[in-house]
Image: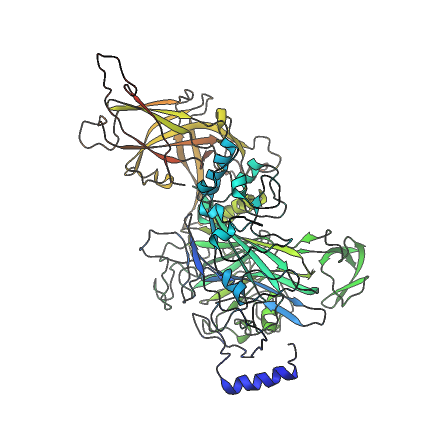
Amino acid sequence: MKSIKTLGLFLFFLLSFLNADAHVGPKDPKAPKPKNDQPTVSYREDCTLPTASIDQDINNVRARLRTGGDVWWDGNGNGRYIVPKPPAGEREVSSIFSGSVWLGGYDPERNLKIAAGQYTGSNNHDFFTGPLDPFMGTTDLPICDNWDQFFEVLGDDIRSAAKIYDANGSIPCDSVSSGVKYWPGKGNPFWLEKYDFELPDTGQGLAAFWDEDQDGVYNPCNGDIPIIDIRGCFPENRKQAVELVPDQMFFWIYNDAGGPHTETFGDAIQMEVQVQSFAYATNDEINDMTFQRYKLINRAQADITDCYFAMWVDGDLGCDADDYIGCDVDRSLAYLYNEDIVDGDTGSDCSSGAETYGTEIPILGIDYFRGPLAPKYIVSEGQGEEHVITGADDEYDDDTYSVGDTIYVIDVLLGDTDEADILVELGMSSFVYTNRQGAGPWPAGTNDPSNAEEFYRLLTGRWRDDTPFTFGGSGYDPGNTNVVQYAFPGLPTSETDWSMCSANLGFGDRRTIQASGPFLLKPGAVNELIIGVVWVPDIAYPCPDLSRLQTADDLAQALFDNCFDITDGPDAPDVCAVELDQEVVLVLSNDEVQSNNANLAYFEKDLLVPDGVSDSLYVFEGYKIYQLVDALVSPQELDNIDKARIIRQVDVQNGISEIYNWTAEINPLTEDRIWTFEKMVEGADEGIRNTIRVTNDQFADGNDTRLINHKKYYFMALAYAHNNWQEWVTNPLDTIYGYETGQRSPYLEGRGNVDVYTVIPRPIIYTDIASDYGDGPIVTRLAGEGVG
């Protein structure tokens, strides 16, 4: 700990005398935990507790976001990572209680710098809202108050603005949605119309955007649009920029230098954190996922050595007292699963009052996609065995590096620590956990941290009391010399692998830490930490098979590897209607400027096709046209015959008719995966037709189904694509391809331009005199009602 000066000591005794309770330690909202009540003195007006929160809810997840560094809970003792997302007012079950980024390292004088979050409250928070001064690394109360808010933008609004601009070469400013218009992009000229504070101007930038006129300033009226910001993924052209638009995105900024650290009681790093949280509404596993990208900017004026970044998660899968944890090291994936076949610590009830999943229990994973950057060295030990190390600090000279008791000799220096361009990306260097105090008979050394040193030890992959993690049992065995960096890396289904299942650890409330380090953090350095939350429903318990989670995570990883350019499928066609006497004719077309299926020429890479496969592209195959019961039906409800019924299907004449997708279920008796197929379409294989005659109401009561004049009818059109690079096989004797390989999803339904169209049949009126303008059948160009 940094020593307190004479004036600090005087103020310490003065404050202690005036208010003995001025620095009460924080409490875990689920149970009390100890805290180091060391007071911290400040000579300026500190920032106050961040308060803003909002729900990210575009898909099957309703995830609470908070501006104070921790997310996924409500600040009042309730987890708010709700999945599946029920309608408003219905029972909600949460899969995560809380999550936060942790940071730690040493300054040149070997003072520990650390910032972490768990359950932010008035007496326990290290993080504050808003950016830091780029030169001093400081902030103040007005800046923090101004930035205690979120900036949200919807993908539909971005794509709509882009279409208008692309079609006309310009866009009227009054037609731009609020989320697009007031996006906190650098230099936004409309910012002060809504906010009464200036945007900062720093070299590291703010919220990312496509700069159409390349002037360095965000101006939506000049065709600029918000995009996600991923290192190495900046679009090469406008079309790619539109592809990098999630369906819902939030941006906010926080820092660790706005006041005393009352969570860790450590010194501030002076780190600015810019966050983008985003998600997609799809008809596959991505609909159950959320993603977060943290941009970390070091505003300190000196090096931070032995630095670590981490993602801390308190995952409560329904009930908080009966969860197990583990990690898939190769995938950098932490996962959370239930201890037994019923979610709850007393049957399906939970003593904490949390809602439970009962017997339909999911599994959840946190994929650590990307960690920080660090200088890279290749070193040798003994007979020339090569190792990769990162972030050599001042304790070692230019020729050696020490790890524990081993001295390594640097053979090849690939990068000097002063050269910021020679860096490597660190992955998950450790996976460890803690126990909530009182939630089981666990040693005190395994409990949650209570001071700066204990937080830092967990970042380095050790227990809070500096005991190393060791192989077997709970991982806490001070006499064991088999030190490990990854806890519970084995499969829960294996009796010989090390997992919580094989160790039979029983009830507990665990928190996980996925960390990267050590590395050297230079002043002004910009790093990323990117995670994805993967969720799979209704897993067979106990000791579940991870295959479905791994399959979903492979899709999430492929999405990350593809720069979050999601496979959208072909855009739905535009629909015009000719309204006739008790019938309508629907006319399908594709805009040649805006549609990705102009001239029926859609193609897109399948994210899951292995490298080297030549047939890796989905191509347009056909249309489906539905009648809907009303205008409120969403694309996710088209399989509900009470709400939607298919009236026509047309497809390319190419010998492809029936298309099946494959899904896996677990046999509860053998725990083997059973693959089943679902017919996605039964094609006519007669060629594309662009006019569809409709004379009957699929929802009519009685025998007379003819359309009724002047009555509203509702329709939706979808486009779909096909790829089958290899027939799906599950042959264990297949020595070439292995046990499971091939195209699991030959059918791909498009997400774009999906609208509800309202049509009204009406009689044609003819007269014997010369007709006036407007007589004859009415042709309606339908704009539709957007449903995402």
State the image quarter where residue 711 is shown: top left
At horizontal 27% and vertical 19% (from top left) the residue drawn is: 775
Quarter of the picture containing the N terminus is bottom right
The answer to whether residue 736 is left or right of residue 60 is right
Using the image as rendered, state which of residue 185 and residue 63 is in the foreground.
Answer: 185
The answer to whether residue 342 is left or right of residue 142 is left
Using the image as rendered, state which of residue 152 and residue 625 is in the foreground.
Answer: 152
Residue 173 vs 507, above or below: the answer is above
Q: Position of residue 371 (x, y in %)?
A: 62, 55
Residue 359 vs 116, above or below: the answer is above
At horizontal 58% and vertical 78% (from top left) the residue drawn is: 41
Residue 360 vs 598, above or below: the answer is below
Quarter of the picture containing the C terminus is top left
What's the image's color scheme?
rainbow
Residue 532 in view (yes/no) = no
Residue 53 in view (yes/no) = yes
Residue 20 vs 405, above or below: the answer is below
State the image quarter where residue 222 is shown: top right
Q: Position of residue 152 (x, y in %)?
A: 47, 51
Q: Position of residue 661 (x, y in %)?
A: 44, 36
Using the image as rendered, state which of residue 265 and residue 745 is in the foreground.
Answer: 265
Q: How many marks?
A: 0
Q: Position of residue 621 (x, y in %)?
A: 46, 27
